[in-house]
Structure formats: structure tokens, C-alpha cells
Image: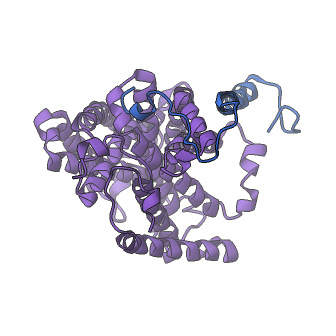
Chain colours: A purple, B blue
């Protein structure tokens, strides 16, 4: 039925099979729509957020998807600025993943602020000393950049490509992409960093506070580094998942291996700096606050195991797998390492958001627990549903992987 | 916020912070404007039959190579 819209020379599943595939994700979207309606209609009392947990599940999702979406800016930087031509074969997928992550995050923030009708206040009545304001500026501008990067991919659709003006417009956008990629890199560097900096400057919360360089706490640099290490891993993961589901080879192994190798070095560097930062925190910030390391892990479910998971299991282990050429060339190990890296980064964001707020600050404080409501889960999972739907539609109707035809000749 | 807003203060912090935002927006805007003007200039001037295929752009099919 939709065959005139499919890219030429590639095989796609039937319309019926595609429709059935979209059903569970449409279900997630419906759940999210109902949750969003309730939050907008009745207010944020539909959530378990409170004065203690002003940042909760949605911010964990936000920070996680923004870190995982960093593959778009970093792959763009490597492709257009550094000139790694092999990555042209995966850049389209990276851009779409980035677009999904950032648009999903901004949609979720629209609900999180409670009154989206006043969302523009952050731009018009900006508090220029707030890292959150900088983050808002940068993610909004970067979403514009991602939309511009997405447009030429959409215009390569078989039917749209027949329209002369769109054909030339798409080509010209493609030719100018380096300018947008450079702008995206600038914007991403600062918002990824400021998301981390935001926690590092919480001097009243020694669990998150860090020393730093000039106005930037160490978490600023660690968040940038962790995002550029995990972003490409997430891009590889999504590509491999698409390859498994479509039972095709979509990206030349050279591009995947290059991205994995770069990720390995960045992840290793991140782990070294993260360990140094943790030691600096244990022997510097914590004693200065009159506390000991174990004071943070006495109550609630967040014990030392969380540090072990974050640094050793989902940090050092995937870095080692990706560093060993034979291991990263093995598909199973590559997917495992990428998955572990992504889990590690999500865990890191969770620790900085939820654990920071849960741990008591004053001697008379108690440990605060937090469990999201079904409405909070609904909105968070809707972003996943939206992402899978958009990526599936992009794979079906757009030439997402330029080498697909070459790697899978139709007999 | 612009320099005309009542909250604006003429100091280095405001100039750097808001200046960088406006530079980023200007680059995005100018980039888009350049592409739109170039597209307009690239459009063939002579009238063509509506069912005629658009002109092939050299090396367009090799985006992944260059």
C-alpha cells in the first residue's frame, strides 16, 4: 500500500506487519497522552514529586536521553569537522536518534514545569547566573539544529525527492551541514556540561558538591566526557538492534568499529577521571563537610553497591571490552559493552538526581524515599514509544543507511 | 531577554551570556537564510514540463562517500 514511499532498491516488511509492530508503541504513547492530560488538567499532584523531590523520574529520563543522544553532535563533529568520512554511513541514524532524544526530553520538560503556557519565561526573564537557564537555551537551540539536520534526510524520501525545489533545498542543506554541525557541537558542549555543573555547585549537598576549575565544578567536565563516550555507544546499540530486527547488514563494520574505538578511549579517560573525582570527593569534599564516605550509604536502598555498579561493572568493564580490539570486533561483546555503557550513564544520572535528593543533609533530616506514580512512568515511557515509532518510520520511508542497498543487494 | 527588556543590565555577564545565545541563533538563522537564497538561485529559470524529473545533482548519490 505504501510501496511508492519506500526507498528504491531495498526490502521492507509488509504494511500489515509494520502496523502490528507499531501497536505496542502506540499503546505507550496513549498511556503517555493520558498521563500528560491528567498532569496538565489536575496539576503535578498526579506525581510523587514534592518539595524534596522537585527533580524526579522525568529529570532522570531527561538527563539520560540527553546523554544518550549526544551521539548526534559527537558523530556530527567527527564527520563534518574532523573529517572521519567512514561515519557518513551512520550519521543519519545518529541525527535521528539525537532528534528523538532531544525532542522527547523537551516534551517531557513541558509537562514537568507544570504550566507549559509559561515555558517562555525562562527565555524572556532569564536568570543568567543559573546553569538551568543555560541548559534550557542550549537544548532549545540544539533541537533547532537537529531539526535542520533531519530535514535533508526527510527530503530524500522517494516522493519528496521528485519535487524540484525540495530536491535542491535538501541538497543545499546537506552542503552547508558543517556550519550546523559546528553550532551543534558548541551548544551541546555547554549544555551537557552545565547539566553536570548544576549538581556540582550544590555546596549544601556534599553528596553532589565538587571542587572545580574557575566557575565550573569537575562534574561539568565529567558530564561532557560521559555523554560523548556513551552517545556513540547508544548509536551503535540502536543500529545493531535495527540490523537484528531487519535481519540485514546496514552499516559497514569499519564505521561501527571506528565509533566503538573512539568510544572506548573516551570511556576509559572518563573512568580514570571519574575515579580521581570520586577519590577527591571522598578525601576532600566529604571530610570538609564533617562527614565520612559511609555516612551517605547508611540508610535506604542506595548502598555502596551503587558505587561499585557505576564505576566497576558499568564503567571499567565495558571500557575494557571496547578497548580490546578482538572483543569489540565480536558482535556479542560489542553489543554487551555498549549496553553496559548506556546503563552506566543512566545510573550515573540517577545517582546525581535521585540519590542526591534522598540522602539527608542536616542531622535532624531523615532519608526520603521516592517511587514514581503510573502517570510519571506513562510520560517517561511515552518518550521511548515515540522514539521507536519515529525511528521505525524513518527506517521504513527514508534512506537512513546509505550503504543498505550495497550491503543487501535485492535478488 | 533583549537589551530593551527591563531586567537587562549592561555588564559583562549579561553581554557574554546573552551574546553567545544571540550568536548561536544568528548562525542558525544566517545558515538557513543562505540555504534558502541558494535554493532560489539554483532553481532553473526556464519553464519545464510539470512531469519532468528534477535535474540530477552531481555526486548527490554519493553522499556517503564525500
Q: Residue at x 51, y 76 (%)?
A: A31
Q: Residue at x 39, y 36 (%)?
A: A228
The spot of residue A127 in percent (x, y) is: 72, 41
The spot of residue A43 in percent (x, y) is: 67, 73
The spot of residue A144 in percent (x, y) is: 61, 42
On-image quarter of the N terminus of chain A: bottom left
Residue A277 visible in the current orientation: no
- All told, the count of numbered labels is 0
For residue A241, side relative to residue A178 (left or right): left
A76 or A310: nearer the viewer: A76
The spot of residue A343 in percent (x, y) is: 31, 53
Q: Quadrant of residue A108?
A: bottom right
Q: Residue at x 53, y 39 (%)?
A: A149
Residue pushed farthest left? A326
Q: Quadrant of residue A111?
A: bottom right
Residue pushed farthest front? B49
For residue A56, side relative to residue A245 (left or right): right
B60 or A201: nearer the viewer: B60
For residue A315, side relative to residue A95 (left or right): left
Q: Quadrant of residue B59?
A: top left
Q: Is residue A14 above or below residue A359?
A: below
B28 or B9: nearer the viewer: B28
Residue A265 visible in the current orientation: yes
Q: Residue at x 59, y 35 (%)?
A: A168
Amino acid at each position: 500500500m505504501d510501496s511508492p514511499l519506500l526507498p528504491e532498491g531495498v526490502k521492507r516488511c509488509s504494511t500489515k506487519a509494520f502496523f502490528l509492530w507499531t501497536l505496542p508503541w502506540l499503546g505507550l504513547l496513549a498511556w503517555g497522552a493520558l498521563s500528560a492530560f491528567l498532569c496538565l488538567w489536575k496539576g503535578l499532584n498526579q506525581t510523587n514529586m514534592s518539595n524534596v523531590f522537585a527533580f524526579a523520574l522525568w529529570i532522570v529520563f531527561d538527563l539520560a536521553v540527553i546523554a544518550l543522544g549526544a551521539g548526534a553532535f559527537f558523530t556530527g563533529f567527527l564527520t563534518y569537522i574532523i573529517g572521519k568520512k567512514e561515519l557518513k554511513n551512520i550519521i543519519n541514524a545518529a541525527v535521528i536518534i539525537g532528534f528523538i532524544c532531544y525532542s522527547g526530553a523537551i516534551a517531557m520538560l513541558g509537562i514537568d514545569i507544570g504550566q507549559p503556557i509559561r515555558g517562555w519565561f525562562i527565555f524572556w526573564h532569564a536568570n543568567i547566573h543559573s546553569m538551568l537557564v543555560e541548559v534550557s537555551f542550549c537544548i532549545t537551540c540544539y533541537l533547532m539544529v537537529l531539526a535542520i539536520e533531519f530535514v535533508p534526510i526527510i527530503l530524500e524520501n522517494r516522493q519528496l525527492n521528485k519535487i524540484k525545489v525540495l530536491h535542491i533545498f535538501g541538497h543545499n542543506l546537506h552542503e552547508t551541514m558543517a556550519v550546523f554541525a559546528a553550532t551543534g557541537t558548541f551548544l551541546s558542549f555547554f549544555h551537557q556540561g552545565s547539566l553536570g555543573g548544576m549538581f556540582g555547585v550544590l555546596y549544601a549537598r556534599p553528596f553532589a558538591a565538587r571542587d572545580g576549575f574557575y566557575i565550573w565544578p569537575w562534574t561539568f567536565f565529567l558530564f561532557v566526557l560521559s555523554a560523548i563516550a556513551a552517545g556513540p555507544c547508544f548509536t551503535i546499540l540502536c543500529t545493531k538492534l535495527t540490523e537484528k530486527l531487519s535481519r540485514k547488514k546496514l552499516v559497514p563494520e569499519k564505521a561501527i568499529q571506528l565509533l566503538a574505538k573512539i568510544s572506548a578511549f573516551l570511556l576509559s579517560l572518563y573512568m580514570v577521571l571519574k575515579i580521581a573525582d570520586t577519590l577527591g570527593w571522598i578525601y576532600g569534599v566529604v571530610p570538609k563537610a564533617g562527614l565520612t564516605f559511609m555516612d551517605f550509604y547508611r540508610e535506604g536502598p542506595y548502598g555502596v553497591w551503587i558505587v561499585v555498579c557505576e564505576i566497576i561493572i558499568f564503567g571499567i568493564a565495558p571500557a575494557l571490552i571496547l578497548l580490546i580490539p578482538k572483543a569489540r570486533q565480536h558482535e556479542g561483546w560489542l553489543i554487551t559493552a555498549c549496553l553496559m555503557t548506556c546503563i552506566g550513564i543512566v545510573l550515573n544520572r540517577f545517582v546525581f538526581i535521585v540519590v542526591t535528593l534522598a540522602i539527608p543533609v542536616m542531622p535532624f533530616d531523615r532519608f526520603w524515599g521516592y517511587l514514581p506514580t503510573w502517570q510519571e512512568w506513562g510520560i517517561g515511557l511515552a518518550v521511548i514509544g515515540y522514539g521507536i515509532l519515529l525511528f521505525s518510520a524513518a527506517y521504513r520511508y527514508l534512506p537512513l543507511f546509505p550503504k543498505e542497498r550495497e550491503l543487501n543487494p535485492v535478488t | 531577554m533583549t537589551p530593551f527588556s527591563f531586567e537587562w543590565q549592561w555588564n559583562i555577564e549579561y553581554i557574554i551570556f546573552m551574546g553567545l545565545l544571540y550568536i548561536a541563533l544568528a548562525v542558525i538563522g544566517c545558515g538557513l537564510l543562505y540555504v534558502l537564497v541558494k535554493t532560489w538561485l539554483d532553481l532553473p529559470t526556464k519553464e519545464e514540463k510539470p512531469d519532468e524529473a528534477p535535474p540530477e545533482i552531481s555526486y548527490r548519490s554519493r553522499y556517503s562517500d564525500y
